[in-house]
Image: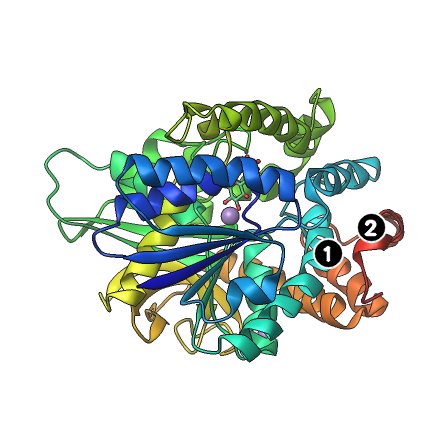
Amino acid sequence: NLKIAVIGAGSTYTPELMNGFITRNKQLKVDSFYMMDIDKEKTEIVTGLGKRMLEANGMNSRVIITDNVEEAVEGADYILGQIRVGKLDARIRDEKIPLKYDLLGQETTGAGGFMKALRTIPVMMDIAKKIERLSPNAWFINFSNPSGIIAEALLNNTNVKMLGLCNAPINMIKRAKEMLPENVAKFDYDFVGLNHLFWLTALYADDKEILQNLFLGGYKNNSLKNIPEVVYDEELLKAIKGLPVSYLNYYYFKDKMIKKCKDADMTRGEECKVIEAELLELYKDTNLKEKPGVLDKRGGALYSEAAVSVVDAIENDRNEVHVVDVKNNGALSFMDKDDVIEAKCVINKNGATPLKLNDFNNDHIIGLMQGVKAFEKLTVKAGIEGDYTAALGALLTHPLIGDYSKAKDVLDEMLEANKEFLPQF
Ligand code: G6P
Ligand code: MN
Ligand code: MN
């Protein structure tokens, strides 16, 4: 019977996660959930609903609230990471400060995502060290953003058994399935990229590649609730030669998206604050015994499916294919072995092994991936060592930033605004 630790359990997404364990309660017998968070009040509310959900479904797992990482991870089988350092207020600053310099203000992409990484890396490194010491055999499955950069940091600088996770791939694959002709019995796809920077480069319907035909009608890129929709026309899709995740709207429509952010009444983080307040009110109602529909206003749709299906695949040695963030290890010939990529992986009790993508020669995608990976590597160096030169280098490397005056000004303002969360600087 399993001990599951949730780090950042006060998140209003937690009922979504509990739902995943309820759905798979036959395959995964959970003895205890250790719900760790530094925000006691929120955790009690969120966990209260979680407990009612378990009971309503006849599960008698113990639910323990703690603010102590060590207590939560010691002897755990699976540790799920979903922290937000500095909470939504810090996110809102990440969204607002870059806009002053005509740069994108987004939670995980560009300068905002970079800053989120600098705040999150020290905390995640600390958690990872505790896991190494107290629970070296546990699997650490992390959803905390920027998920790809956190995986890059942990997989290359600690010995924890970890995987990075995101719900965007599963949402996009679902979307792609809806685009199939009727009566297709067998479906598969080629997936290539990094976290929040990926493409589907082929769709196979009964072994026949059909993606290129789908370009004809254009593509409405709207598979995530938190990102404004953009329509891609045929010419653009032919140049890309793939279907991009919604986060790529920020790259292909950079100016338009920055303008959208500037013109909006509220940033996404400010919207999330409103949704969160509404959610917490609902969660307090002791008659509520299931995940409320309001949660679907958030971008994390299918988070539980992504997370718990991976736990199930490891625990029950299923050899299933899921998209997760792991070291490349030769799967992509154009990336280094130690580069963390987001890829289709075979998952079993030994973890996740990325599937080799042969003969991939899309120079546009290769170029963007290598550029953003260089940005990520520099960000990890800055995040771990507090190296200002690496931080500046990261921003100069990012395809959405580059310009020296903007990079330096935004960096200095963000470092100042985040001082209390940057022990490494
Ligand atoms: C997407 C991403 C997540 C992100 C979320 C934000 O689904 O994959 O990494 O956390 O959206 O949604 P929110 O509702 O917080 O804007
Ligand atoms: Mn994500
Ligand atoms: Mn490299």
Residue 331 lies in quadrant: bottom left
Residue at 40% across / 62% down in the picture? 3
Q: Residues within 10 Å of mark 1 (few under 14, many from 20)?
A: many
Q: x and y percent of residue 56 in the render?
A: 30, 34
Q: Residues within 10 Å of mark 2 (few under 14, many from 20)?
A: some
Q: Is residue 31 visible to us here?
A: yes
In the foreground, 280 or 196? 280
Q: x and y percent of residue 107 in the render?
A: 65, 43
Q: Is mark 2 within 8 Å of ligand 1?
A: no
Tell me how far mark 1 sits from mark 2, CA to CA.
Answer: 8 Å
Q: Quadrant of the C terminus?
A: bottom right
Q: Find the residue positioned furthest to the top.
A: 265
Residue at 71% across / 61% down in the picture? 397
Of pointers 1 and 2, the one earlier in the residue sequence = 1
305 shown above or below 320: above
Q: Quadrant of the N terminus?
A: bottom left
The residue indicated by pointer 1 is 119
Q: x and y percent of residue 238 in the render?
A: 41, 44
Q: x and y percent of residue 138 in the render?
A: 44, 71
Q: Is residue 242 visible to us here?
A: no
Residue at 74% across / 62% down in the picture? 394
Q: Secondary structure at mark 1?
A: helix
The residue indicated by pointer 2 is 418
Do the residues bearing badges 1 and 2 touch, measured as CB atoms within 8 Å?
A: yes
